[in-house]
């Protein structure tokens, strides 16, 4: 009888432990024992990548944003004959770039700590380091996320905000992921770095009325009314430096995307945009806090998901 009772107690403890593991919280020290050099490995690789092409910092940040309407590395998965990933979703196809950088980092991490660090965590660290390398703030990345075994093409198409979104649409999209309007406005400052394709801002420079005339004329030079869809323009006048000039542009009606200018167009975010335009410290602090908050959106932890050996395919 006693042995049966002991077995039952042990079983309850085991099940409780599994439940705790499945709901374990993320921690910046998650790999302190299992892969203590992870942050240095990622930072060194990103230093090399951004050194080769400064735009890569913005590209990896954007990839993280697009993944973090799930934060599970699903955006990294390739299509196969039996699996459809998210790379062909409208917001991602012929747009997201830098996958080879994540591949290279993963190879280095696997060499140091085999089957230990998730692709989701690698992407989160790489995005942070890309911002730092372009002069932006640092933040403590919560680690311990695991990688999804699935992806959602329909989710990527429907949940990611469009460059033609209204303010109401933007607020709704971010709210659906647990982020408030202030988080959204701070995170939009990621457009302080990087480039955009003509197809994403053509309607803005030809049709919108809340736009500086000289700015529209300049942008039309490289973005004709038809054709040239992939021609590039800077999202911000200091495109390789992470600063608050993005918000200064909005106040001057020089936002490149329609969705950018919606943040300063007589609506609820005008005051915050003006604050950020006057204070880099206010912006950078809120941006860092919002990045941490976004990293904690429904992460896969414990026994959920997996640790991919190759970020492009499930194990």
Image (tube, rainbow, N blue to C red):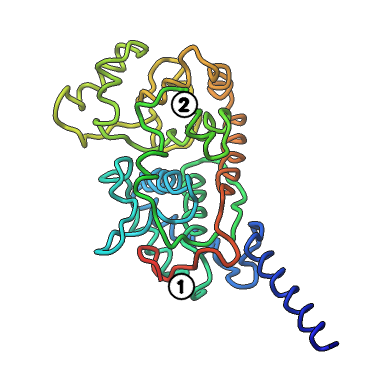
How many marks the image carries: the answer is 2
Splitting the image into 4 quarters, where does residue 279 fall? top right
Q: Is residue 45 left or right of residue 40?
A: left
Q: Residue at x 52, y 32 (%)?
A: 184
Where does the image place residue 314, in percent across and percent down from the top left? 39, 67
Disc number placed over residue 245 in the picture, else none: 2
Q: Quadrant of the C terminus?
A: bottom left
Where does the image place residue 298, in percent across and percent down from the top left?
A: 56, 50
Most extreme residue toward the right is 2
Q: Is residue 271 left or right of residue 211?
A: right
Q: Position of residue 249 (x, y in %)?
A: 43, 21
**Which of the two discs, 1 and 2, sits closer to the camera?**
1
In screen coordinates, is 2 left or right of 124? right
Question: How dense is the environment of label 2, judged by Cα within 10 Å: few (below 14), some, or many (20 and up)?
Answer: many
Confirm whether residue 43 shows in the render: no
Q: Quadrant location of residue 100? A: bottom left
280 relative to 311, above or below = above
Task: Identify the residue under disc 1.
Answer: 110
Q: How far, Cα to Cα, is label 1 from label 2?
A: 39 Å
Identified at 48% across, 55% down, the residue is 72
Whether residue 181 is visible, yes or no, is: yes
- Please identify the residue farthest to the left as the structure is shown: 227
In which quarter of the view is residue 166 placed?
Answer: top left
Q: Is disc 1 surrounded by few (<14), some (14 to 19) or many (20+) residues within 10 Å?
A: some
Is label 2 in a helix, a strand or a loop? helix
SS of the residue under disc 1: helix
Q: Is residue 52 above or below residue 208?
A: below
In what quadrant of the picture does the N terminus appear?
A: bottom right
């Amino acid at each position: 009888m006693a042995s049966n009772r002991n077995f039952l107690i042990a079983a309850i403890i085991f099940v409780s432990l599994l439940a705790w593991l499945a709901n374990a919280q993320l921690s910046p020290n998650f790999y302190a024992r299992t892969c203590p050099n992870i942050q240095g490995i990622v930072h060194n690789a990103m230093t090399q990548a951004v050194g080769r092409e400064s735009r890569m910092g913005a590209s990896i940040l954007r990839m993280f944003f697009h993944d973090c309407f799930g934060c599970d590395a699903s955006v990294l998965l390739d299509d196969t004959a039996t699996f459809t990933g998210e790379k062909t979703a409208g917001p991602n196809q012929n747009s997201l770039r830098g996958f080879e950088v994540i591949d290279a980092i993963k190879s280095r991490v696997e060499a140091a700590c085999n089957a230990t660090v998730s692709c989701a965590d690698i992407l989160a660290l790489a995005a942070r380091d890309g911002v730092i390398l372009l002069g932006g703030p640092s933040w403590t990345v919560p680690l311990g996320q695991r990688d999804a075994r699935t992806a959602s093409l329909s989710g990527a198409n429907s949940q990611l905000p469009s460059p033609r979104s209204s303010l109401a649409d933007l607020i709704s999209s971010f709210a659906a992921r647990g982020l408030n309007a202030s988080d959204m406005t701070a995170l939009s400052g990621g457009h302080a770095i990087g480039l955009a394709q003509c197809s994403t801002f053509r309607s803005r420079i030809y049709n919108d009325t809340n736009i500086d005339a000289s700015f529209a004329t300049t942008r039309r030079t490289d973005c004709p009314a038809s054709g040239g869809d992939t021609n590039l323009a800077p999202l911000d006048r200091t495109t390789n430096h992470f600063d608050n000039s993005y918000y200064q542009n909005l106040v001057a009606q020089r936002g490149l995307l329609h969705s950018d200018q919606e943040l300063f167009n007589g609506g609820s975010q005008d005051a915050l945009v003006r604050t950020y335009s006057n204070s880099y410290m206010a912006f950078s602090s809120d941006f860092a806090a919002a990045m941490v908050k976004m990293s904690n959106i429904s992460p896969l932890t414990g026994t959920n998901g997996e640790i991919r050996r190759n970020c492009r395919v499930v194990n």
